[in-house]
Image: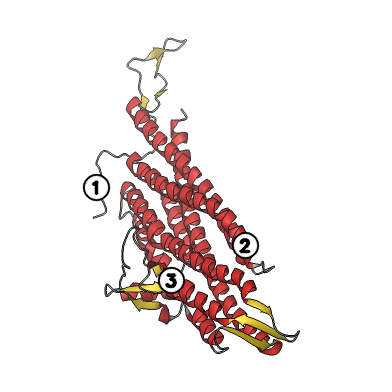
Amino acid sequence: MYGIQTSTSMPLTRPQTPETQAAAQRPDASGAAEPARAVAQGPSVPALGAAKIKADELSRAAQDVRRSVQRQASYETKLVEQRSPFSGVVPPSAEAALAKRAALAGELDEAKNAQTLSARLFEGSLQGVAQSAYSMSDEQKQALRSGLEDAFAAAPPQARSAGAPMLYSANAVADDGMSDSELWAEISKAIGQIKDNYLGVYENVVGQYTTFYKAFSDILSKMANWITPGGDGNKVKLDVGALRSALEDDLKTKFSLPNKEAVLFPVQAKGATSVQGGSKSDAEKWAAEMGLPDSCVKQSADGKWVVVIDMTPVSTMIDNVGKLGSGVVEMDNAKFQSWQSGFKAQEENLKNTLQTLTQKYSNANSLFDNLVKVLSSTISSCLETAKSFLQI
């Protein structure tokens, strides 16, 4: 059920050193015969050869793991930098936020690509451990199970669901219900599923919402041209028509169904000409995971279900600016300040949603990082055991 356990895999335990009796007795000084002392023998050549193969497999796996940890740390750093334009500590201008984000976008994409490559290599390194036929000690099995349970202890439901096969396998091998080779093969598959079906979802979510927020920031940068002084110092002119058109066309229409730009979940296939949905249950679970309202779960044209960007703040902006009139509207400062206060409140809602989603993405990265570290620690422990076996 969990793979094929080969009969040739042998546990890496140090062979006993047998003692041999001499074929003949040696006389002592008095001429009396005495038994010859036992002669210690080291591990046999076949045993050493098998152990060397296992140690080499584990060494290569450990090297891949170290590179994976380094790439993960690099990506975490870039992700923190990417969030900084929306930190809210010192609110930057729209132009400054866009400039900083543009400067970091290339570096973030490069780090993300490196992380994706690292995850694939890490899967391969785990398969290498499975092929090494190394047998863990009971202590190593328990340490692996405890480490994985700790990593998932505070994880959200979707993460625990993605990691369930890994947790099951660790428990099974600790209870002698699964071979070590089967365990590492299962973990190799599970780590890939977590990368694609959990971390990968958040990569898409943050990418989609960041594109949406960039379009909104572009509108903010144009507003300076749409707000001008009125006839006297107590009035302001606002180009209501231009602002409303931008909000409707560049945001609400572009980032709503049936356009793929609207979809946060499921991840849309590259090159697909239409939106591809999933089950309603999965869409509802992911909307809850992201902290989005139920209204973000919508049925797509294929009859299935998707999670879309929350357009409530944008709709409120459009309604409020429409109440001011049409064309270029002149109003007193008090009325303008009242409208601007409501507009900024909705702007803050958009920013908070981006910050929340980005933080959840960061948490997903941290979970993946912790899993890599737990597995890395176990592999390193196995490697040290293999090395100690070869020290004759």
Sooner in the amino-acid sequence: mark 1 or mark 3: 1
Judge by depth and name the residue closer to the eye, 209 or 340.
340
The residue that disc 1 covers is: 4
Is disc 3 placed on a helix, strand or loop?
Answer: loop
Report x, y in % for residue 14. Answer: 40, 35
Mark 2 nearby-residue class (10 Å; few <14, some 14–19, many ≥20) = some
Farthest-out residue, front: 231
Residue type highlighted by circle 1: Ile
119 vs 287: above or below: above
- Tag 1: Cα neighbours inside 10 Å, few (<14), some, or many (≥20)? few
Q: Earlier in the sequence, mark 2 or mark 3?
A: 2
The structure residue drawn at horizontal position 57% and vertical position 68%, both measured from the top left corner, is 217
- Mark 3 Cα-neighbour bin, 10 Å: few <14, some 14–19, many ≥20: some
Q: CA distance from mark 1 to mark 2?
A: 49 Å
Q: Which numbered dot is residue 84?
A: 2
Residue at the spot of label 3 = 254
Badge number at residue 295? none
The quadrant in which the N terminus is found is bottom left
| Residue 339 seen by the camera | yes
| 324 displayed left or right of 30 | right
Say which quarter of the image contains residue 350. bottom right
Mark 1 or mark 3, whichever is nearer to me = 3
| 15 left or right, relative to 343 | left
- The local secondary structure at tag 1 comes to loop
x then y, percent, for residue 378: 46, 48
Q: Is residue 161 above or below residue 59?
A: below
Q: Earlier in the sequence, mark 1 or mark 2?
A: 1
